[in-house]
Image: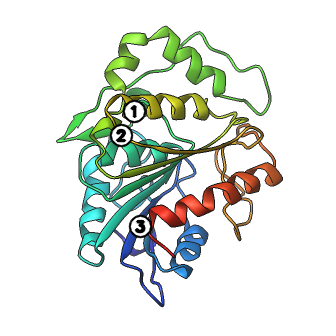
């Protein structure tokens, strides 16, 4: 991976946990969050996973092997490896962890299914594995936004209802995630129904006898603010919901669980 497409945050006092940090559709490298976690002892690599050198230009048929390779590199440096993703990055994190071993997953504003993405007018899965697109849910072609900036929450909900067979095939096999799982979601998320997705993931894991930690806040939106973080700017123009205060309250509630999963005292 090209140097400009990653940021390595090295702790002064390592705890033995390494984190692969994966952003969402913004395509950004999460430098601030990487440094925050490193300040508490985690070895962190934040990556760009599309739009970078030699990468797919959009979230469209991105190889899961991209994340697996980075996890393998981190495994050489730490006893525990965790993947921490937000939004599309949470979808990537859970999908990756269902296919390759990790010590844990932190998924912020997660999805319970794999979604389709478009590039050059062609729709296909967000992800491939072994060079094959994973089953994915496409968008409801009859949906239209009813707000400006657009809220896509109802698009994702209506697509799940319209294509139930695709949704069943595209379900992320979270019961195959052997490590600890922490899900964080805001009830006012206007990008997609993250709390509904979170509860679905929790149920699927419970049916397999697996425990999942869930942290939600009814007024928080799509973007989590951990203690010490500033609100993010930029990204795709859309409604995200929440307020800086509610997003920070969700982050404050989630922070002890983040530290616990990362085994940071």
**Quadrant housing the N terminus:** bottom left
Query: Crowding near pointer 1: few (<14 within 10 Å), some, many (20+)?
Result: few
In the rendered view, tell whether residue 154 sits above or below residue 34: above
Tag 3 residue: 19
From the top left corner, tell me how far across and down residue 185 is, in percent: 61, 42
In the rendered view, tell whether residue 121 sits above or below residue 243: above
Tag 1 residue: 206
In the rendered view, tell whether residue 134 sits above or below residue 76: above
Judge left or right: residue 219 versus residue 255.
right
From the top left corner, tell me how far across and down residue 159 is, in percent: 52, 16
> In 3D space, how far apart are the residues under numbered discs 2 and 1 (Cα atoms)?
5 Å
Decide which of tag 3 and tag 1 comes sooner along the chain: 3
Decide which of tag 2 and tag 3 comes sooner along the chain: 3
From the top left corner, tell me how far across and down residue 203 is, in percent: 44, 29
Judge left or right: residue 42 versus residue 102.
right
Secondary structure under tag 2 reads: loop
Would residue 63 be seen by someone viewing this image from the given angle?
A: no
From the viewer's side, name the closer residue of 109 and 212.
212
Judge left or right: residue 96 versus residue 90.
left
From the top left corner, tell me how far across and down residue 9 is, in percent: 47, 79
Secondary structure under tag 3 reads: strand
Q: What's the residue at 44%, 72% (across, down)?
A: 44
Mark nearer the viewer, 3 or 1: 1
Q: What's the residue at 71%, 71% (across, down)?
A: 228
**Total numbered labels placed on residues in the image:** 3
Residue 68 numbered tag: none
Tag 2 residue: 210
Q: Quadrant of residue 149?
A: top right
Secondary structure under tag 1 reads: helix
Query: Crowding near pointer 2: few (<14 within 10 Å), some, many (20+)?
Result: some
Residue at the front extreme? Answer: 209
Would residue 130 be seen by someone viewing this image from the given angle?
A: yes
């Amino acid at each position: 991976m090209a140097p400009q497409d990653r940021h390595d945050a090295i702790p002064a006092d390592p705890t033995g946990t390494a984190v692969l940090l994966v952003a969402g559709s913004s395509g950004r490298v999460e430098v601030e969050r990487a440094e925050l976690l490193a300040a508490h002892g985690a070895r962190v690599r934040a990556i760009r996973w599309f739009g970078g050198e030699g990468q797919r230009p959009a979230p469209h048929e991105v190889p899961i092997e991209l994340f697996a390779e980075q996890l393998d590199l981190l495994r050489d440096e730490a006893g525990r490896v965790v993947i921490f993703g937000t939004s599309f990055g949470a979808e990537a994190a859970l999908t990756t962890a269902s296919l390759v071993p990790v010590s844990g997953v932190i998924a912020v504003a997660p999805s319970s299914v794999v979604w389709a993405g478009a590039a050059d007018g062609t729709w296909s899965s967000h992800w491939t594995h072994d060079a094959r697109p994973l089953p994915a849910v496409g968008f409801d072609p009859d949906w239209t936004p009813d707000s400006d900036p657009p809220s896509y929450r109802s698009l994702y909900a209506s697509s799940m209802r319209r294509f139930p067979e695709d949704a069943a095939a595209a379900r992320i096999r979270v019961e195959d995630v052997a490590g600890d799982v922490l899900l964080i979601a805001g009830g006012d998320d206007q990008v997609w129904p993250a709390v509904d997705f979170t509860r679905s993931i929790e149920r699927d894991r419970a049916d397999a006898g697996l425990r999942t930690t869930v942290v939600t806040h009814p007024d928080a939106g799509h973007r989590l603010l951990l203690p010490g973080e500033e609100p993010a700017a930029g990204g795709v123009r859309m409604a995200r919901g929440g307020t800086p205060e509610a997003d920070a309250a969700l982050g404050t509630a989630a922070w002890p669980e983040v530290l616990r999963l990362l085994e940071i005292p």
